[in-house]
Image: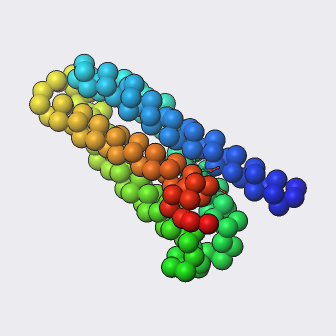
């Protein structure tokens, strides 16, 4: 396989992962979440999360792996990814910052908020704590979705020059 075909294949995988990660979170935010908030019922949200979790984790792993490979296509020496003299390093630094923020929010949702929401849902109590937790979870979901869109815009700026001028 020639160098260009390899690059194109990696870019295709990166785009498929982006579609899955960002698209899944948009469906969650725009379709599943409003219904859960309206009915004050976390169950549809929990069902979606448990079905989407494996796919989403696979997509994120693909994004990190292919993202690093694409970064090496532009700057083969990773030490240069952080060098101020390289305009392209703004893209990499932004992507890595978005990744850190995404991981922190996702871990907080998965290990702090979600277990409490599952416990509450199984008690069938619809008190104040329940809706407070539901809004905490909603906040996490919206943040991860906005970060996903920021990932897409940052990635696109390689072509558009928004973050980095050629
Ligand atoms: C969920 C996470 C991510 C999403 C949704 C995402 C999305 C995208 C999108 C839509 C593009 C535009 C591709 C194009 O213009 O053809 C892109 C490009 C790129 N992304 Fe990501 N990305 C993610 C994570 C990462 C990570 C972790 C890195 C590693 C630092 C990374 C590095 C890159 C690079 C270097 C490009 C430029 C590729 C090119 O146009 O040749 N991405 N990304």
- Judging depth in this view, the residue of 20 and 134 nearest the camera is 20
The image shows residue 27, relative to residue 61, as above or below, that is: above
The image quadrant of residue 71 is bottom right
- Residue at 70% x, 46% y is 12
Q: Nearer the viewer, residue 112 or 140?
A: 140
In-image side of 97 versus 117 (left or right): right
Q: Is residue 133 left or right of residue 75?
A: left
Vertical relation: 42 (above or below) 156? above
Picture coordinates of residue 127 (x, y %)?
A: 12, 27
- Left or right: where does residue 105 sit relative to residue 164? left
The answer to whether one can see residue 60 in this image is yes
Q: How is the image coloured?
A: rainbow
Q: In the orientation shown, which residue stands out farthest toward the left?
A: 128
Image quadrant for the N terminus? bottom right
Residue 162 image position (x, y, % from top left): 51, 58
Quadrant containing the C terminus in the rendered view: bottom right
Give the quarter the ligand 1 occupies: bottom right
Q: Residue furthest right?
A: 1
Q: Is residue 21 left or right of residue 47?
A: right
- Residue 25: x percent and y percent? 45, 37
Q: Residue at x 62, y 55 (%)?
A: 159
For the point 29% across and 47% down, which residue is it? 112
Look at 18% across and 31% down and name the residue there.
130
Above or below, 153 against 47 in this view is: below
The x and y percentages for residue 13 are 68, 47
The number of discs equals 0
Q: Is residue 92 visible?
A: no
- Nearer to me, 126 or 150: 150
């Amino acid at each position: 396989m020639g160098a260009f075909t390899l690059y194109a294949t990696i870019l295709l995988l990166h785009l498929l992962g982006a579609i899955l990660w960002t698209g899944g979170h948009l469906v969650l935010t725009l379709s599943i979440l409003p219904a859960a908030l309206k009915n004050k019922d976390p169950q549809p949200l929990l069902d979606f999360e448990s079905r989407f979790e494996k796919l989403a984790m696979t997509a994120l792993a693909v994004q990190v792996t292919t993202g690093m490979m694409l970064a090496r296509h532009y700057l083969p020496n990773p030490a240069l990814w952080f060098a101020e003299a390289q305009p392209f390093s703004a893209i990499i630094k932004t992507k890595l910052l978005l990744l850190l923020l995404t991981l922190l929010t996702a871990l907080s949702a998965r290990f702090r908020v979600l277990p409490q929401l599952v416990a509450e849902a199984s008690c069938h109590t619809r008190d104040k704590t329940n809706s407070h937790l539901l809004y905490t979870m909603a906040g996490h979901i919206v943040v991860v979705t906005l970060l996903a869109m920021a990932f897409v815009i940052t990635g696109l700026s390689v072509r558009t020059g928004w973050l980095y001028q050629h």
